[in-house]
Image (cartoon, coloured by chain):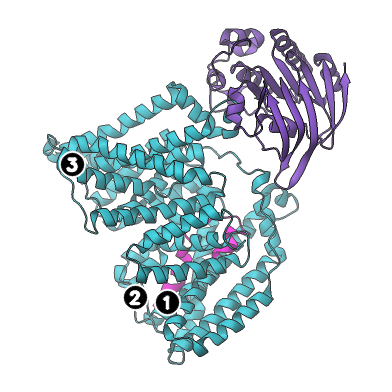
């Protein structure tokens, strides 16, 4: 479904990733582990097209996408949930979901607002509220829901458990397993090993921009 | 003033506010989404006026207005897709430069198409008369204009808040990259928003022709009005623009109504300065999201090469041996503007403070020198020495307000102060000679030959540049740069960032004043143009052409620009457009400055 081949990327002259190889299959949940600065976020950004790889290839759903614009990658069905959430704080919760909305895809779960609110019940009563007034946990829910509104085939989650209270981490974990059940494949970056182990089928380990090990769980 | 007169003035203000709002709303929309400050927005308004005047001859007024607006929107479409799209990733200031090049090109295109005379539009058929309001006559058409502003405001509000497209526009205004990652085609969105902004500007221009004639000077006038409205209202806020348009429209109308018509040139800038001091993000604005990323970090400046400067000095010192008087005068100009650019560079480069009104200090230096000589009858040498101090004082006063702000708001406040200084020079007839300026500002007899004056300029300008370079490479310069790159971290290691910036203002003003005083004595006369907006823009162009993050770049930029302007204005009829075209080519080819 999603594959990186000898992917190298970075910012300006600074190279962060060196020949990274990874693959996520249909219906899989895969964790990308590593310390701060190992290149987890950079990997996800490069997969999404938010930074141009220096070299290497990215394949998604049978097509090579590394020269595509981010919006084209998104429309091909790859969702992205950034680390710092990046909610549109000027917009209401419903409007945030509206921005993420894309037409339903074949053979992919479709997320109507109703289904999204089933997944994240806390958002249901907040629809008309400006996103700036949400708590951190609510923002994290909204951020995932916003990406799901695009009915993605696969989704990139950048440190979804970071900075959340344990009870919220639990909810996010449940949501990820829910996604897996629905057939969405997930690549998540994590520093929280026990969380990753609980939700992921297998993991990769990044160290200083290089792929170190792949673990089957 | 009687009650009915007040009412009429009030209605007059509302009519003016409507036109203002149309332009400002477009400007604000474009800025909100693409973060481009479109200098050419006034030019689009002007284009709308001329097109409507032309079209109304054959099609009649009512058809010509929407058609002219549509044509301007089409022009906007072309501008966005052929030019702006290429420079969205370039530094903010270069984008500004590119849109200023458009101002020059559009103005000359209008000159070519419609000639230099003002073109009077028709009256609106069916609304050509006046109605009696409170016993006084009020034009019917102005009543229509009064309704137009709120109508467009409501339409825009609904478009932005109730449609999917509008939601995307608001999302992209806040975080383009995230919107793109959610599948929003930002390219198409930018094009559409720019075309919409152009449509509004064209509509504003076209609908104004029954009130005022189309003229070539209206572009910069409208542009600065629209800037003020957008900044007072808060960048990117449409309700803010509406509110500010009402405020400025009314203040202007009452200034005229109460008989303070001289004040109208500066009043909006005074209002803006007051608003920005109390509400730094405008009436309804919020602090801009930090757009800086790892990609825009400034490379460190190289150490100054005094060898280069010395070599240059030797080379320039032997030029008069074989050059004619024409070359010497041109070189004198180049030296003066090189110092002007270098002083601006201190603010823009190491200081990170884009000044759009640097001509104010240049002009202060020039006028002080002239006034001391002519009115106080001081010797020329003393006038030349004292003038920069006045410029520095002015820069310290203006700068104190400016350093409270940053980014585009700071730039606009510097522009406001420059405009205030200009209108004082323009209107204080008894002291400054008004629009005629001062004449007879000649140097002392021993400097009266072009050669002698050239050597004086050479010594003072290169000496000043050497001082500036030394300053940039001193602890003060490092602290200034630290404050630019990370105000918080700089403050945390004990640097008073604002104090450094304020000092930089004073120093930059001082050296701009030296340049201005030298300029005054080299020309023998001073006109208000020495501190006008175009002169400030000249400085920006010089610095940006040469490269903000270089040391010697601004000098080369000044030399190239002064030489280009001199040679083009002699040989080429549409030289402004030629300069504009050169700037565009340079910006697209060298997005980080030429001499990099």
Residue B56, disc: 3
For the residues marked 2 and 3, what is the alpha-carbon distance in whole angstroms?
A: 44 Å
Give the SS element for disc 3: helix
Labels 2 and 1 in the same subunit: yes
Q: Mark 2 touching mark 1, by CB under 8 A?
A: yes
Name the residue that disc number 1 marks: B520
Task: Look at the image and tell me whether residue B569 can be seen.
Answer: yes
For the residues marked 3 and 1, what is the alpha-carbon distance in whole angstroms?
A: 46 Å
**Which tint was used for chain A?**
purple
Q: Look at the image and give the residue range highlighted in magenta.
A: B344-371
Give the SS element for disc 2: strand
Which residue shows up at 13% across the image and 40% down it? B136
User: Looking at the image, which is closer to me, B492 or B325?
Assistant: B325
Q: Residues within 10 Å of mark 3 (few under 14, many from 20)?
A: many
B27 over B493 or under it: above or below:
above
User: Looking at the image, which is closer to me, A200 or B477?
Assistant: A200
Give me the chain that's cyan: B
């Amino acid at each position: 479904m999603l594959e990186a081949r000898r992917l190298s990327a970075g910012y300006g002259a600074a190279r962060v990733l060196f020949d990274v190889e990874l693959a996520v299959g249909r219906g899989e949940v895969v964790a990308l582990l590593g310390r701060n600065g190992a290149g987890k976020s950079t990997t996800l950004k490069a997969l999404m097209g938010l930074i141009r790889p220096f070299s290497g290839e990215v394949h998604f759903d049978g097509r090579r996408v590394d020269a595509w614009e981010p919006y084209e990658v998104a429309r091909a069905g790859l969702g992205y949930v950034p680390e710092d959430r990046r909610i549109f704080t000027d917009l209401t919760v419903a409007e945030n979901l509206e921005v993420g909305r894309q037409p339903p895809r074949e053979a992919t779960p479709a997320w109507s607002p109703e289904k999204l609110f089933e997944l994240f019940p806390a958002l249901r009563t907040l629809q008309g509220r400006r996103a700036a007034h949400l708590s951190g946990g609510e923002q994290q829910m909204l951020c995932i829901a916003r990406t799901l509104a695009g009915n993605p085939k696969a989704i990139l989650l950048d440190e979804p458990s970071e900075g959340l209270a344990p009870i919220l981490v639990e909810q996010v974990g449940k949501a990820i397993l829910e996604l897996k059940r629905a057939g969405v494949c997930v690549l998540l970056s994590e520093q929280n090993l026990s969380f990753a182990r609980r939700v992921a089928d297998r993991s990769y380990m990044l160290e200083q921009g290089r792929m170190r090990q792949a673990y089957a769980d | 003033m009687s009650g009915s007169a007040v009412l009429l003035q009030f209605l007059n203000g509302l009519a003016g506010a409507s036109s203002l709002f149309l332009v400002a709303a477009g400007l604000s929309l474009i800025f909100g989404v693409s973060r481009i400050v479109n200098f050419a927005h006034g030019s689009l308004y002007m284009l709308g006026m001329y097109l409507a005047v032309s079209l109304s001859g054959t099609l009649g007024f009512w058809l010509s207005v929407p058609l002219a607006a549509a044509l301007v929107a089409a022009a906007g479409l072309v501008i966005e897709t052929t030019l702006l799209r290429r420079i969205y990733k370039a530094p903010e200031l270069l984008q500004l430069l590119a849109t200023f090049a458009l101002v020059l090109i559009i103005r000359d295109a209008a000159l070519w198409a419609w000639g230099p005379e003002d073109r009077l539009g028709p009256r609106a058929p069916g609304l050509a008369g006046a109605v009696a309001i409170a016993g006084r006559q009020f034009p019917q058409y102005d009543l229509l204009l009064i309704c137009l502003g709120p109508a467009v405001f409501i339409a825009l509000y609904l478009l932005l808040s109730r449609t999917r497209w509008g939601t995307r526009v608001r999302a992209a205004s806040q975080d383009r990259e995230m919107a793109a990652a959610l599948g929003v085609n930002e390219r198409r969105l930018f094009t559409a928003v720019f075309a919409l902004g152009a449509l509004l500007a064209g509509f504003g221009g076209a609908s104004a022709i029954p009130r005022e004639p189309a003229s070539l000077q209206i572009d910069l006038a409208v542009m600065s009005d629209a800037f003020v409205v957008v900044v007072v209202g808060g960048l990117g806020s449409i309700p803010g623009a509406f509110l500010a348009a009402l405020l400025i429209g009314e203040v202007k109308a009452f200034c005229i109504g109460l008989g303070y018509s001289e004040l109208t040139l500066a009043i909006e800038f005074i209002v803006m300065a007051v608003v920005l001091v109390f509400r730094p993000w405008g009436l309804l604005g919020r602090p801009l999201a930090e757009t800086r990323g790892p990609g825009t970090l400034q490379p460190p400046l190289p150490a100054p090469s005094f060898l280069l400067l010395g070599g240059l000095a030797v080379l320039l010192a032997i030029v008069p041996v074989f050059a004619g008087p024409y070359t010497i005068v041109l070189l004198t100009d180049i030296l003066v503007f090189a110092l002007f650019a270098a002083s601006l560079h201190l603010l823009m480069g190491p200081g990170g403070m884009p000044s759009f009104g640097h001509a104010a200090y240049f002009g202060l230096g020039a006028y002080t020198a002239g006034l001391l000589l002519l009115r106080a009858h001081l010797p020329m040498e003393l006038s030349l020495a004292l003038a920069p101090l006045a410029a520095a004082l002015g820069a310290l006063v203006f700068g104190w307000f400016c350093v409270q702000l940053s980014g585009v708001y700071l730039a606009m406040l510097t522009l406001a102060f420059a405009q205030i200084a200009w209108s004082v020079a323009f209107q204080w007839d008894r002291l400054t000679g008004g629009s005629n300026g001062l004449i007879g500002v000649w140097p002392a007899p021993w400097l009266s030959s072009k050669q002698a004056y050239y050597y004086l300029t050479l010594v003072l300008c290169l000496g000043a540049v050497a001082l500036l370079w030394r300053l940039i490479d001193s602890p003060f310069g490092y602290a200034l740069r630290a404050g630019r790159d990370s105000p918080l971290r700089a403050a945390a290691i004990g640097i008073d960032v604002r104090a450094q910036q304020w000092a930089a203002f004073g120093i930059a003003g001082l050296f701009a004043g030296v340049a201005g005083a030298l300029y005054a004595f080299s020309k023998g006369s001073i006109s208000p143009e020495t501190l006008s907006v175009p002169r400030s823009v000249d400085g920006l162009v010089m610095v940006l052409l040469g490269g903000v993050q270089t040391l010697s770049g601004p000098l080369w930029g000044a030399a190239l620009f002064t030489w280009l302007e001199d040679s083009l204005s002699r040989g080429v009829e549409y030289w402004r457009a030629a300069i504009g075209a050169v700037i565009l080519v340079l910006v697209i080819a060298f997005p980080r400055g030429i001499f990099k």
